[in-house]
Amino acid sequence: MWVFDYWIKNEDRTLTVKGGNPNLFYRPRDHKLVVVDHNLAFDNSFDIESFRRLHLVANADLPPELEGVGDEDYKLRMTRAMEKFDGYCDNLPPEWLNTDANGREWVATIKRQLLEFKDDSFWEALK
């Protein structure tokens, strides 16, 4: 979740000792986490320091340096996801793309942001 939320610039999965907004459910029948609510992803005002301080994982008593962050496994997963990005976008409803906010440029901006994982600076920010 930590890497995924950072990748999509989702600062909205928070938890502190005073509460928060984890956007997460536990499904006991198969011991799975169900991650929900990505409506604030791709936030232009994403703040890495706030993310590091308030994210659900940051406050789960886990070590701050997550083993494997930046390794080839994550990069491979992201590469595979991005191989299908254009196809996913081809299936977006036309009304999402024909807006006053220029939906096609919005999609292009998201794609550029998602491709940042190819830069070392993307991974350095998580350390």
Image (cartoon, grey):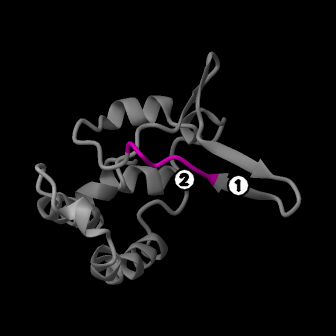
Above or below — where is 69 with respect to 52?
below
Amino acid type of disc 2? Met
Q: Nearer the viewer, residue 37 or 5?
A: 37
Q: Kindly tell me whether residue 16 is visible in this rendering.
A: yes
Quadrant hosting residue 72: bottom left
Q: Relative to 61, does residue 78 appear above or below in the rendering? A: below
Q: Which residue lies furthest to the top in this view?
A: 18
Q: How crowded is mark 2: few (under 14 residues within 10 Å), some or many (20 or more)?
A: few
Which residue is rendered at x = 49% and y = 29% of the image?
54
- 1 or 2: tag closer to the N-terminus: 2
Return the residue found at the far front. 95
Stretch in magenta: 35-40
What secondary structure do most residues of the magenta stretch adopt? loop
Horizontal side of 72 relative to 114 (left or right) equals right
Please give the residue where the numbered disc 1 appears in the rendered image.
Answer: 33
| Residue on which disc 2 sits | 1
Q: Residues within 10 Å of mark 1 (few under 14, many from 20)?
A: few
| Image height of 65 relative to 45, above or below | below
The answer to whether 106 appears left or right of 66 in the picture is: left
Q: Does dot 2 land on a helix, a strand or a loop?
A: loop
Q: Do the residues labelled 1 and 2 touch (CB within 8 Å)?
A: yes
| Residue in view at x 40 percent, y 76 percent | 81
Mark 1 lies on a secondary structure that is strand
Q: Does the magenta stretch include residue 100?
A: no
Q: Which of 25 and 90 is in front in this view?
A: 90
Residue 21 percent location from the top left of the image: 57, 31
Residue 56, image x and y in percent? 57, 37
With 117 as the anchor, is 24 left or right in this view?
A: right
Disc 1 residue type?
A: Leu
Residue 76: give x, y in percent of width and height. Answer: 42, 79
In the image, taking residue 32 as reference, residue 127 lies left or right, namely left
Q: Does the magenta stretch include residue 37?
A: yes
